Amino acid sequence: MPTLVEIAHERSNLDEASLEHLNSLLSEWGMLADFCFADMLLYLPTRDSQFIVAAQVRAATGQTLYDTDLVGVVADTNERVMIDDAYKSAKLITGEIKVEMIAEPINLMAIPVRFGDRIIAVLTREWSQRTGRKPGQLERTYLAIFEVFAKMISTGLFPFDGRGADATVAPRVGDGVVVLDADTRVRYASPNAVSAMHRVGISANAVGQTLAELGIAETAARHAFERLEPVVEEFEQTTDVTLLTRTIPTLKRTGRQVSVTGGVVLLRDVSELRRRDRLLLTKDATIREIHHRVKNNLQTISSLLRLQVRRLKSEEAISAITESVRRIRTIALVHETLSREAGEDIAFIEIVRPLLRLVEEGLQSADRPVKFSVIGDGGRLPATIATPLSVVILELLQNAVDHGFPEGSKGGSVLVTLGQSDDGQLSVRVIDNGQGLKSDFEMAKVTGLGLSIVRTLVTTELAGTIQMRAATVADSTKELKIERAGDGTVVDLKIPIVGEK
Ligand SMILES: Nc1ncnc2c1ncn2[C@@H]1O[C@H](COP(=O)(O)OP(=O)(O)O)[C@@H](O)[C@H]1O
Ligand SMILES: [Mg+2]
């Protein structure tokens, strides 16, 4: 479906400023259609002196006359007379037309759209006896409001060009309407508006009272009346009732003077929405706070253990506890990252980088430098996977350093490659170009604590697989060279990624 701007460029001589005025009219006309219970069409004058429908809107409050889309249709002679009349006279014109396929006569109101000193388009309201609503007080009031807005359109006072609050978030006519006079005295409140006011404790009849007396939306109305433009405001009326309001001043032009004749407040009870927003916010903040505290507790534990290490003499005990401290710090790292994230999953690379730093810090020998690098990022992982996997990677990195480059060797490189395959598997490879595995190495027979932890976490907690082998020259990459067979070790992990449901 072509847009207003497309039709205008193709068929009319309207300039950009006029189109902007019409576009802001379109952002408001859902409200207009709702107030008049009818279909509305926007006609643009064409270069060949016709009128073409550039936009169409139906009322949420009434039945539609036209099931078909009329955008792009040119006005036929019978409606053109009235549209042309409104266009040339700059006055509101009402009358009847005959529409093909519809038996009864159609009522038409043609409203000239003024922009500056010119009429740039014509808006029509179209309805019939069949689609009209049975008139009651609400219907009469809404139609009167509509007529005020129609008058404002023809005198260039509506829409409120560029100014005024965003109508898209604002309440709709069906949400509740309060009509005000120029002193913000309530002249009418729709049943939904009365219900909303009930919920904030206004049980007396609001009609005849000012907003200040009622204690609602008063500042918004004052601002709207002073600035001559709509104001959207949300009120926390009581601790558990929140009202969203949009106050639109109704204006009148007398000569050069523009004055406020009253206003319309659209209001909606958004308490339930806001309550849910708040709950979500607090839940999220709570989870983050908990991660933060877990991290702090783990840091305390690792500090206590470090104090303990200082009092130990036995080499074995010292290295055992030092390793434990590193494992605890790894888990703390995951919680720290989680405490900064909004959800329960994290960009895994944000853990891998500091992990590499952690292992690097533990290396103090300048005689055998080790270069660390990472390829890929592994995407986002749920915390349930990220925590055990971090511990696994730490062990593998530590082994690469401890066994690949033991004292007396000359150092080398360690590379971590992260990737997610299409079938949802995460693949992690840790490779070093160090001394390589002993000839009798067998994964199944390993008794060391490090690889036992790795095996248990990978096969049980992560439901994945692990493979360890000697590197070959073919495993070389830009980051890491394998000079000859027998050098280096490759560890491959495959982990299925299943988030917590
Ligand atoms: N990257 C590696 N290069 C060479 N040997 C390794 C490597 N990773 C593990 N190993 C071998 O596997 C053994 C078991 O490792 P692990 O269970 O972590 O115990 P630890 O590191 O305490 O010796 C190591 O002693 C070592 O012989
Ligand atoms: Mg080890």
Image (spheres, rainbow, N blue to C red):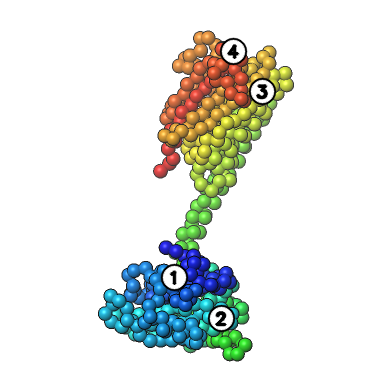
Disc sitting over residue 118 in the figure = 2
Residue 487 in view: yes
Type of residue at label 2? Arg
Q: Residue furthest left?
A: 103
Residue sitting at 60 percent across and 90 percent down? 255
> Disc 3 designates what residue?
370
Disc sitting over residue 424 in the figure = none
Structural crowding at the residue carrying mark 2, measured as other residues with C-alpha within 10 Å and reported as few (<14), some (14–19) or many (≥20): some
Residues marked 2 and 3 touching at CB (< 8 Å): no
Residue 237 in view: no
Structural crowding at the residue carrying mark 1, measured as other residues with C-alpha within 10 Å and reported as few (<14), some (14–19) or many (≥20): many
Q: Nearer the viewer, mark 3 or mark 1?
A: 1
> Disc 1 designates what residue?
55
Pointer 2 or 1: first along the chain: 1
> Disc 4 designates what residue?
484
Residue sitting at 42 percent across and 37 percent down? 498
- Give SS at disc 1: strand
Type of residue at label 3? Val
Position of residue 354 measured from the top left corner of the image (x, y, whole percent): 62, 34
Pointer 3 or 1: first along the chain: 1
- Give SS at disc 2: strand
Pointer 4 or 1: first along the chain: 1
- Give the CA distance from mark 2 to mark 1: 20 Å
Type of residue at label 4? Arg
Type of residue at label 1? Ala
Residues marked 4 and 1 touching at CB (< 8 Å): no
